[in-house]
Image (tube, helix red, strand yellow):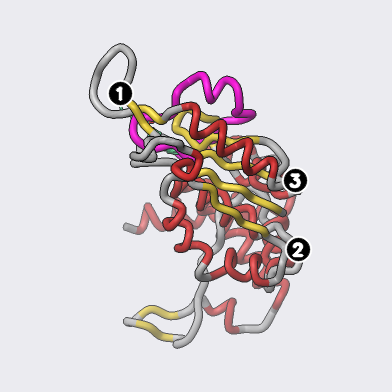
Amino acid sequence: MRIDIVSIFPEMFEAVKCCGSVRRAIECGVLDLRLWDPRDSTNDNYRRVDDRPYGGGPGMVMLAKPLTKTLQRLRKDGAQGRVIHLTPQGARLDQGRIRDLAALSGLVLLTGRYEGIDERLIEQEVDEEISIGDYVLAGGELPAMVLVEGLVRYLPGVLGNDASVMAESFSEGLLDWPHYTRPEQFSGRAVPSVLLGGNHEAIRRWRLQQALGRTWERRPDLMERLVLNEEQHELLASYQREQIDEEILS
Ligand code: 9WO
């Protein structure tokens, strides 16, 4: 997959390029990540990418011209695919959207700074607007990195990917179960005994029950969308009974 990112702070992306799964994806050739600085598409001596807002008010607005030129240059370089603007005005990003976007061969990510981008550039060039959550940051760079890291998990051949994507499809739409490693006792707390017993079927059922129980307790919004099968229904019901019993005892 090729991802072209437009940002006036290309150095910020060293953070994901230097380590972890994004670095591995680049090294093994499944990800081609290219950065484009709109300042390199300016003509004036000051390399201006912003100007004062029409209508007045505080802050600056990103100029349309350097951004169109940047998009022209990256397309000349072979970039293809939809242009995605990272903004709190966009549709909320979720796992399903990440999975669908990861199937594409190319993406262009547009990141704004200051008070935002001239609306006419957005109307003319942007295919889709995506938000990673309802909060305002200083720019779209971190949201773009969030999207890239989310996408990389679906690219083929990145070490460990196949196993973790398979584990995810098993627990579709649920929160994760709790994890434990050595030692068996830590700070007076034991590892749940089922995980030490080696009964793989019992472990599978316990993990599924924990995932269901946590989703029910913590994320009623996710719970509403689930359609439980018979086993899941039974595991959740026994989790709920245990919670109620605990409440009575306390
Ligand atoms: C500033 C602002 C001030 C008062 C009321 C609403 C406001 N919205 C913004 C705003 O969106 N500023 C942006 C800062 C301008 C463009 C880039 N910035 C940005 C992108 N901040 N946060 C994001 C972002 C992108 C994707 N998902 C979450 C946040």
Circles 2 and 1, Cβ within 8 Å, touching? The answer is: no
Viewer-side residue, 99 vs 212:
99
Question: In the rendering, at what x and y percent does residue 236 appear?
Answer: 60, 51
User: Looking at the image, which residue is at 54% across and 25% down?
Assistant: 122
Which region shows up in magenta?
A: 111-133
Disc number for residue 104: 3
| Vertical side of 230 occupied by 202: above or below | below
Query: SS for tag 2?
Result: loop
Disc 3 + disc 2, Cβ < 8 Å = no
Mark number displayed over residue 156: 2
Which amino acid is tagged 1?
Answer: Arg
Amino acid carrying label 2: it is Pro
Q: Quick check: can you spot residue 219?
A: no
Query: Is residue 19 shown above or below 16?
Result: below
Report if residue 148 is visible in the image.
Answer: yes
Task: Judge left or right: residue 49 versus residue 78.
Answer: left
Measured along the vertical axis of the image, is residue 172 above or below residue 65? Answer: below
| Mark 3–mark 2 distance (CA, rounded to whole Å) | 13 Å
Give the residue at x 34% y 27%: 51
Q: Secondary structure at mark 1?
A: loop
Marking on residue 52: 1
> Which image quarter has ligand 1?
top left
Residue 206, x across and y down, in percent: 61, 66
Residue pushed farthest left? 58
Q: CA distance from mark 1 to mark 3?
A: 37 Å
The answer to which of marks 2 and 1 sits earlier in the sequence is: 1
Residues 37 and 247: in front is 37
- Ligand 1 within 8 angstroms of badge 2 C-beta: no
